[in-house]
Amino acid sequence: MAVSILLGSRIVSMFLLFNLFSSEFGFLRPGSSLGINYGQVANNLPSPEQVRLLLTSLRITKTRIYDTNPGVLTAFANTGIDLIVTVPNEAVGMMMDPRQALQWVMTNVQPYFPATKITGISVGNEVYTSDDPTLMSNLVPALLSIHSALVQLDLDSYIHVSTANSLAVLENSYPPSMGSFKPEMANLVVPFLQFLAATKSPFWINAYPYFAYKDSPAKVSLDYVLFNPNAGMVDPYTRLRYDNMLYAQVDAVIFAIARLGYGGVEVRVSETGWPSKGDPNEVGATVENARAYNRNLLLRQIRSEGTPVRPNQRLEVYLFALFNEDMKPGPTSERNYGLYQPDGTMVYNVGLAALTSSASVSLTSSATRDMRKEVGSLWYWILMFSLTFQAFMRMAI
């Protein structure tokens, strides 16, 4: 009896230890909708092969790049990582020509597929807030041409086509149920939504609660934007309660789309994040806030949450960004959205991996392999203890 109690105690201890490892290393569960943006506006980034090892070790299965870098497309082959590629804004006009669009897909997508799991093409980025009327009017024809090229190559059932939009496309976003597009954009947005509905493609939105807090820190609750416990707000028209700003922003887009008659279009977050450093006037740009925002969002993603309007449809989110990028123009914050420094050291640990801040990209893979061996060993001993415990229990009976 004493032996059985001892063995049972050890089994419980090993189980608790395994849970400790799991929660500390914080790996994403299979099927998580969390992705990450892999920007490359820097002169000191690790190689695509090292980035592949890093993403694999963190079990991130979705990433987005802002071009069609052949080195990245080749390095990500046979990894199973979903990859969204981008037609840069300066090439959108050329994509209006179906022949140019076909050539682009045949050069930048087809040779790498399906070994590299390209699942989306973003035609431009924040086009509708670019202040370039020609670019804006060219977008939908370019989307149509790219999609037609995919159809010709029998790739349209694997790869969807859309574009990432700034939240500034909205005229109203508060309360969420009053979400609406800017009136002057109606003639552009309606054909875009028609395309998305016809091709079953998502509406991508770049949503940053950080900006709302930075602009009005005295009026916007920090806990509300960071997903920390807070009183939240209730939409007076729907009576839906919101405990964070990101979900409120997404639902405002959902309502705006529905107002134009396309309520079936899915909304996904193509970018969101928080800077760990900023200029003196960039209130809230701190390591502590960046870690809180991204870690709390990660926990929501692990739970596969949806927004209050669509609670049963998990919200797909891409964090911005994997690395700090030293060549990005603009304020200091623009260069400090990364979870990692280019040398592979963590800016802060959100729970994707329990690696120390001094761990490098070159060590990430081996460190994670060692950890997995430990976890595998733990499972082995748990199994052995369990079998032994059952044997003793049978003997006792």
Image (cartoon, rainbow, N blue to C red):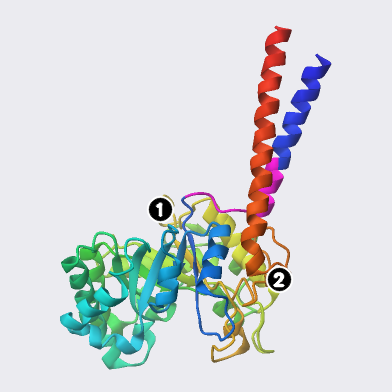
Residue 178 at least partly seen: no
Residue 114 in the image: state x and y as whole percent.
32, 61
Label 1 secondary element: loop
Q: In the rendered structure, which amino acid carries the disc numbered 1?
A: Gln
Tell which of 80 and 223 is nearer to you: 80
Q: Is residue 383 above or below residue 389?
A: below
Q: Which residues are magenta?
A: 18-30
Numbered-mark total: 2
Residue 321 in the image: state x and y as whole percent.
54, 73
Tell which of 125 and 259 is nearer to you: 125
In the picture of the structure, the residue carrying the numbered disc 1 is 313
- Name the outermost residue toward the right: 2
Q: CA distance from mark 1 to mark 2?
A: 30 Å
Residue 93 at least partly seen: yes
Task: Answer left or right for 32 relative to 6.
Answer: left
Q: Is residue 31 above or below residue 298?
A: above
Question: Quick one: quadrant of the N terminus?
Answer: top right
Residue 232 in the image: state x and y as whole percent.
58, 62
**Residue at the (38%, 86%) spot, across then down:** 129
Label 2 secondary element: helix
**Residue at the (66%, 22%) spot, across then down:** 387
In the picture of the structure, the residue carrying the numbered disc 2 is 288
**Residue at the (70%, 6%) spot, across then down:** 397
Mark 1 or mark 2: name the one nearer the start of the chain. Answer: 2
